[in-house]
Amino acid sequence: MTRRYWNINLEEMMEAGVHFGHGTRKWNPKMAPYISAKRKGIHITNLTRTARFLSEACDLVFDAASRGKQFLIVGTKNKEADSVAWAAIRARCHYVNKKWLGGMLTNWSTTETRLHKFRDLRTEQKTGGLNRLPKRDAAMLKRQLSHLQTYLGGIKYMTGLPDIVIIVDQHEEYTALQECITLGIPTICLIDTNCDPDLADISIPANDDAISSIRLILNKLVFAICEGRSGYKRNP
């Protein structure tokens, strides 16, 4: 895999608060190699290491995108939901930003059935089919459609398991990460100072609470994916 330059700037990361970790009492000792200091009861992440692993992740997604691979971005905390959707739509990736439904990947046949139902209901709504039904039946199906849109809207075009999964918060998305590990799907994961760096294929030490930090990391990954996709178009 060729290494490329992704314009990852330490000053930019500091301004975004990428280096701020959790309180020193709330940490995982496995994160010690990724911590550079303690300040006012808070661990400070070593941004040089963050830059290194972020660069590696960008190389990985660029290479995968240039070969037409599919990505899933997962981040379901309320404050990060919009950033996750924006990043995924910009890079034409699938995403989950509300609630991870257990078995979404490991029980793919059930997810696929739900997606077929979702697509059928969307078609019925667009063609006016729901309005021709009795009011009670139409109301029930519209509630179903709304529920499916909330939880499956970001993966409505997904036709199979993703090739790479990007996870914004290891603790919050632990179930999703475990499903990827079970299925052998490569993962890229933002890890704060309370996380386990050994679980994901590429762990990026970063503040997973600050929106500015999450956006910066996602922006770099999305740019790399878009660059890779443009190369895939030129060289089918």
Image (tube, rainbow, N blue to C red):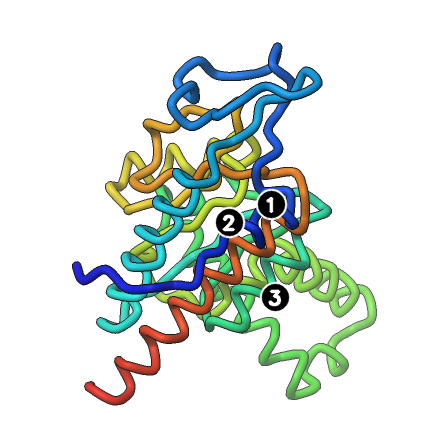
Rendered residue at 52%/39% (across/down): 206
**Sequence-wise, which precedes: disc 1 or disc 3?**
1
Where does the image place residue 18, in percent across and percent down from the top left? 58, 42
Q: Which mark is residue 67?
A: none
**Sequence-wise, which precedes: disc 3 or disc 2?**
2
**Kind of residue at disc 2:** Leu
Rendered residue at 28%/46% (across/down): 185
Q: Does residue 12 appear to the left or right of 145 in the view shown? A: left
Q: Does residue 168 appear to the left or right of 34 in the view shown? A: right
Kindly indicate whether the residue at mark 3 contacts the one at mark 1 (C-beta within 8 angstroms).
no
**Label 2 crowding class (10 Å Cα cut-off): few <14, some 14-19, many 20+?**
some
Identify the image quadrant of the C terminus: bottom left
Rendered residue at 55%/66% (across/down): 118
Kindly indicate whether the residue at mark 1 contacts the one at mark 2 (C-beta within 8 angstroms).
yes
Q: Which mark is residue 86?
A: 3
To which residue does mark 1 refer? 14
What is the secondary structure assignment of the residue under circle 3? helix
**Kind of residue at disc 1:** Met
Of 112 and 228, the residue lying toward us? 228
**Kind of residue at disc 3:** Trp
Rendered residue at 65%/18% (across/down): 23
Q: Which mark is residue 10?
A: 2
Residue 163 appears in which quarter of the rendering? bottom left
Q: CA distance from mark 3 to mark 2?
A: 24 Å
Where does the image place residue 133, in percent across and percent down from the top left? 74, 76
What is the secondary structure assignment of the residue under circle 2? helix
Q: CA distance from mark 2 to mark 1?
A: 6 Å
Residue 216 drawn above or below residue 196 = below
